[in-house]
Image: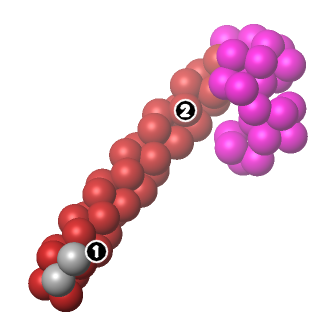
Amino acid sequence: MSDAAVLRKIKAAARKRARAEEVKREATEQLRIYCREARKAGVPVTQIASEADLSRQGVYDLIE
């Protein structure tokens, strides 16, 4: 593969990675909002953790 082709692939992968990081940030913020709403509604942290595929400590860390 030529240098130019490899560099194009590196740039494309870097753009894809940046998009993925933004999507992850947005998803994490949505998860934080909904976990806080669930706590305010009285849903047990254990149940939130199970639904979010997090540990209980992960839920506490997320909503603090």
Residue at 29% over, 57% down: 16
- Give the amino acid at mark 2: Leu
* Other-residue count near label 1 (Cα within 10 Å), few / some / many at <14 / 14–19 / ≥20: few
Q: Which of the two discs, 2 and 1, sits closer to the camera?
A: 1
Measured from the top left, where is residue 41 in percent x and y?
67, 12
Measured from the top left, where is residue 33 in percent x and y?
53, 32
Residue 41 visible in this rendered orientation of the protein: yes
* Other-residue count near label 2 (Cα within 10 Å), few / some / many at <14 / 14–19 / ≥20: some
Q: Determine whether 34 is above or below 60 in the image.
A: above
Nearer the observer, 10 or 56 = 10
The quadrant of the picture occupied by the N terminus is: bottom left
Residue at 52% over, 42% down: 28
| Tag 2 and tag 1, C-beta contact below 8 Å | no
Element on which disc 2 rests: helix
Q: Which of the numbered marks, if any, corresponds to residue 31? A: 2
Q: Determine whether 31 is above or below 8 in the image.
A: above
Q: Earlier in the sequence, mark 2 or mark 1?
A: 1
Residue at 45% over, 47% down: 24
Residue 42 visible in this rendered orientation of the protein: no
Nearer the observer, 5 or 26 = 5
- Give the amino acid at mark 1: Ile
- Name the dominant secondary structure of the magenta segment: helix
Magenta region: 39-64
| Quadrant in the rendering for residue 47 | top right
- On the image, numbered disc 1 is attached to which residue? 10
| Quadrant in the rendering for residue 15 | bottom left
The answer for how far apart the CA atoms under marks 2 and 1 are is: 31 Å
Farthest front residue in view: 1
Left or right, residue 35 beside residue 26 = right
